């Protein structure tokens, strides 16, 4: 099959990692795979996978709403799709999901799939929510198959009347890297302690691996955590990732006078090593699907503290392998972290719970295998219904 994946942004982040993992599996199994994306992609993807997957940039496919550029992006993708004549068009992310599916109408024989990585209409104002849902309902008319990263995320779309059925396909990842992880050799430097410091004498470590995006709430998290750090001084915060608001996070560290407590590690190719170093891992997003990084935290055997968002209950069990906090109140996150840092027995119990958690649903091989099988099953179903007469499977 010729398979076209469409993303708004091509960063080093969860939805991109999930999508490219599918692409690589599909390319290795004989499919012709093209990734269509917006401007300013991270060069990592082309450099490392350009020999397996084709990358095509659409300059007007931008993340913010921009009516003129949005129309240009639809026209550009229509021309692209006409020339490629794909068998499958699989859109990802909110903006590319809407625009890509509108453009896909020019290839009536293509299977149109939308991947739901996040519930975009959660934790937003009512007006914005209504706009999101209206746009999704309109795009659903041109969608043959919905695939979500978790059952709860898919159910959110069903509950809002966007579609009638969603297939869950969990994000795949190389879990052995996390199961067998050891702390990085440069951990004394990361924590700002002498090289001869023993692990028993090192500070407690709170880790957040997340792209620097507004919805991840790094700044608000630091503000909520400042009083805890004042009362629990031997603690270091590690932030790993990159993204558009990184400078704002650095400014917040200075503003809250947390330079002695916070290290921005940049993007690391060994996130599993940081997770193995951490005493507790955290994610403070206001919106998510089922974040890959939380699965990775648990696979490493590290307790987690996460916001209560749809999908997370499928991996995090409150009081078993982590603690779930009020998504609207980051002071609750700070209080839970303080509780764990001051209670080594509870921390150890949660670590054992994390190590005992079954994460096999997130094995890397299952992602591409299951996604591609759903394409083939849905195409066969539509073919049996009769070309041009089959209803969209929404």
Image (cartoon, rainbow, N blue to C red):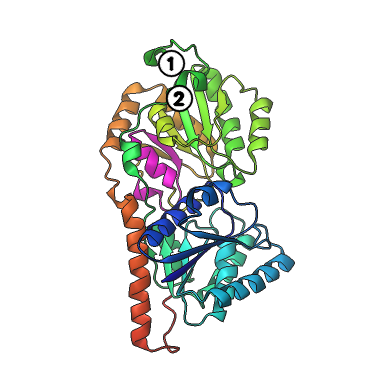
Query: Which residue is situated farthest in the right direction here?
Result: 68
According to the image, label 1 marks what residue? 202
Element under disc 2: strand
In the image, the segment drawn in magenta is 292-315
Quadrant holding the N terminus: bottom left
Q: Are marks 1 and 2 in contact (CB under 8 Å)?
A: yes
Decide which of 39, 292 is in the foreground and name it.
39
Q: Is residue 309 magenta?
A: yes
Residue 340: which disc?
A: none
* Residue 143 rendering spot, x and y as whole percentages: 48, 74
Taking the spot 59% from the left edge, 74% from the top edge, the residue there is 103
Residue 205: which disc?
A: 2
Decide which of 204, 170 is in the foreground and name it.
170
Taking the spot 53% from the left edge, 17% from the top edge, the residue there is 192
Total numbered labels:
2
Q: What crowding class fits label 2: few (fewer than 14 Cα within 10 Å), some (14-19), or many (20 or more)? A: many
Taking the spot 45% from the left edge, 71% from the top edge, the residue there is 2
* Residue 137 rendering spot, x and y as whole percentages: 54, 73
- Vertically, is 253 above or below 357? above
Q: CA distance from mark 1 to mark 2?
A: 9 Å
* Residue 180 rendering spot, x and y as whole percentages: 31, 34
């Amino acid at each position: 099959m010729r398979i076209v994946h469409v993303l708004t942004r091509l960063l080093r982040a969860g939805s991109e990692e999930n999508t490219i993992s599918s692409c690589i599996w599909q390319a290795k199994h004989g499919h012709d795979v093209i990734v269509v994306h917006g401007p300013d992609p991270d060069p990592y993807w082309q450099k490392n996978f350009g020999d397996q997957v084709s990358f095509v940039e659409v300059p007007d496919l931008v993340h913010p709403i921009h009516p003129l550029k949005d129309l240009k992006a639809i026209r550009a993708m229509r021309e692209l799709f006409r020339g490629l004549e794909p068998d499958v068009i699989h859109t990802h992310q909110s903006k590319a999901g809407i625009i890509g599916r509108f453009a896909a109408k020019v290839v009536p024989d293509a299977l149109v799939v939308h991947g739901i990585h996040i519930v975009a209409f959660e934790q937003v104002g009512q007006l914005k929510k209504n706009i999101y849902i209206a746009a999704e309902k309109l795009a659903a008319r041109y969608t043959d198959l919905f695939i979500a990263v978790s059952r709860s995320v898919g159910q959110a779309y069903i509950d809002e009347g966007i579609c009638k059925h969603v297939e869950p396909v969990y994000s795949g990842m190389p879990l052995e890297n996390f199961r067998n992880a050891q702390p990085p050799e440069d951990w004394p430097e990361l924590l700002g302690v002498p090289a001869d410091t023993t692990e028993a004498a090192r500070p407690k470590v709170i880790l957040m691996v997340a792209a620097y995006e507004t919805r991840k709430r790094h700044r608000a998290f630091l503000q909520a955590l400042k009083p805890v750090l004042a009362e629990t001084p031997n603690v270091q915060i590690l932030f790993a990732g990159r993204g558009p608001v990184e400078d704002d996070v650095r400014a917040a560290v200075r503003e809250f006078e947390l330079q002695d407590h916070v290290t921005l590690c940049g993007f690391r190719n060994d996130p599993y090593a940081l997770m193995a170093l951490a005493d507790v891992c955290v994610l403070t997003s206001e919106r998510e699907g089922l974040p890959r990084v939380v699965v990775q935290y648990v696979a490493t055997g590290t307790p987690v503290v996460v916001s209560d968002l749809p999908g997370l209950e499928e991996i995090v069990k409150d009081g078993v392998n982590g603690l779930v906090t009020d998504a609207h109140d980051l002071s609750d996150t700070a209080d839970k972290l303080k509780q764990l840092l001051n209670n080594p027995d509870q921390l150890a119990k949660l670590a054992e719970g994390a190590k005992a958690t079954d994460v096999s649903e997130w094995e890397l091989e299952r992602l591409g295998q299951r996604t591609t099988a759903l394409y083939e099953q849905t195409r066969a179903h539509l073919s049996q219904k009769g070309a041009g007469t089959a209803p969209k499977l929404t």
